Amino acid sequence: MVVSIHQLDDGAWLSVNDSRSVPVSELWLLARHDFCDCEPADFLAEGFVEVGVDWPDVEGRIAGQCVQCGASGVTGWLALGRVERESEEFHRVDPSSVHVPERRTRLATPSE
């Protein structure tokens, strides 16, 4: 199975299978992040810096700024969507839901 993923228009769009799927200029709600001191941060996406696949998730690092405090920079890895195995159809995430940057790791430490 081959899925084509590209940044278009100098990082303004994420293209999946030759279809513009995720734009910038959206507000993302970030929790447990190190972007700024706001918790949660209202992050305005200004451009995709890096995209990648952690199958079946499509992830990216996004340049932008916090609309609360004005801090600007680049996020950690954010899930942008998921590719269905059978249909190869891409389903993007809702940027207004809460997102935690960085690739997933165990969220809790098992008791000893």
Image (cartoon, grey):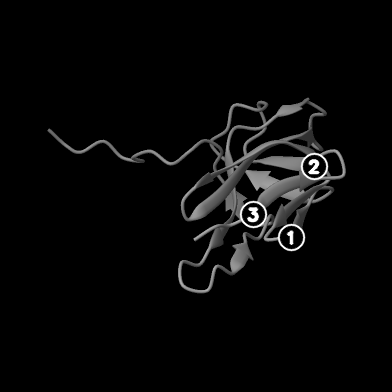
At x 80%, y 40%, the residue is: 11
Residue that label 1 marks: 18
Mark 1 residue type: Asp
Disc 3: CA contacts within 10 A as few (<14), some (14-19) or many (>=20): few
In front: 86, or 70?
Answer: 86
- Residue 103 appears at what percent x and percent y? 48, 38
At horizontal 67% and vertical 32% (from top left) the residue drawn is 38
Where residue 81 sits, quadrant-wise, is bottom right
Q: Are marks 1 and 2 in contact (CB under 8 Å)?
A: no
Mark 2 Cα-neighbour bin, 10 Å: few <14, some 14–19, many ≥20: many
Q: Quadrant of residue 71?
A: top right
Q: Residue at x 36, y 41 (%)?
A: 107
Q: What residue does disc 2 label?
A: 44
In this view of the protein, which residue sits in the foreground, 112 or 105? 105
* Marks 1 and 3 in Cβ contact (< 8 Å): yes
Q: Height in image: 6 above or below 61?
A: below
Marks 1/3: CA–CA distance: 7 Å
The residue under label 3 is 4
Which quadrant is home to the C terminus?
A: top left
